[in-house]
Amino acid sequence: MHTQTHLAQHHMTDLHTQAEAYRLAKEAKPERELRTRLGWTLVEVGLRLATPAPAIAP
């Protein structure tokens, strides 16, 4: 096999690997959005718990 052909074959394999990794990362994005929403919800609940309740007038 010629050197140039062999190098081109390795380059194509590398490109396919990168494309597969990108595709998998793109599919995993919704999980991150869910994690972000859950995190902000926990922050909001924590802020509500940390805020003192208003005093009730007699």
Image: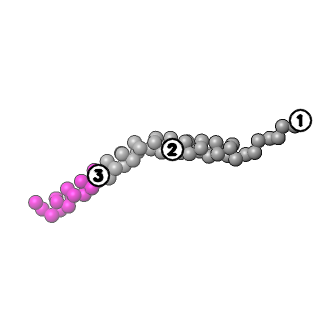
Q: Residue at x 16, y 60 (%)?
A: 6
In three-dimensional space, the C-alpha distance between marks 2 and 1, rounded to whole angstroms, equals 44 Å
Q: Which mark is residue 35?
A: 2
State the residue at coordinates (87%, 37%).
57
Query: Among all residues in the image, which is located at the extreme front?
Result: 58
Q: Amino acid at mark 2?
A: Arg
Furthest residue toward right:
58
Q: Find out whether residue 13 is within the magenta segment.
A: yes
Where is residue 42 shown, x and y percent of the image?
Answer: 59, 44
Q: Is residue 39 magenta?
A: no
SS category of the residue bearing label 1: loop
- How far is disc 1 from disc 3 in space, using C-alphas? 71 Å
Residue drawn at (34%, 50%), measured in percent from left and top? 21
Label 2 – label 3 distance at C-alpha: 27 Å
Mark 1, residue position:
58
Q: 32 or 1: nearer the eye?
A: 32
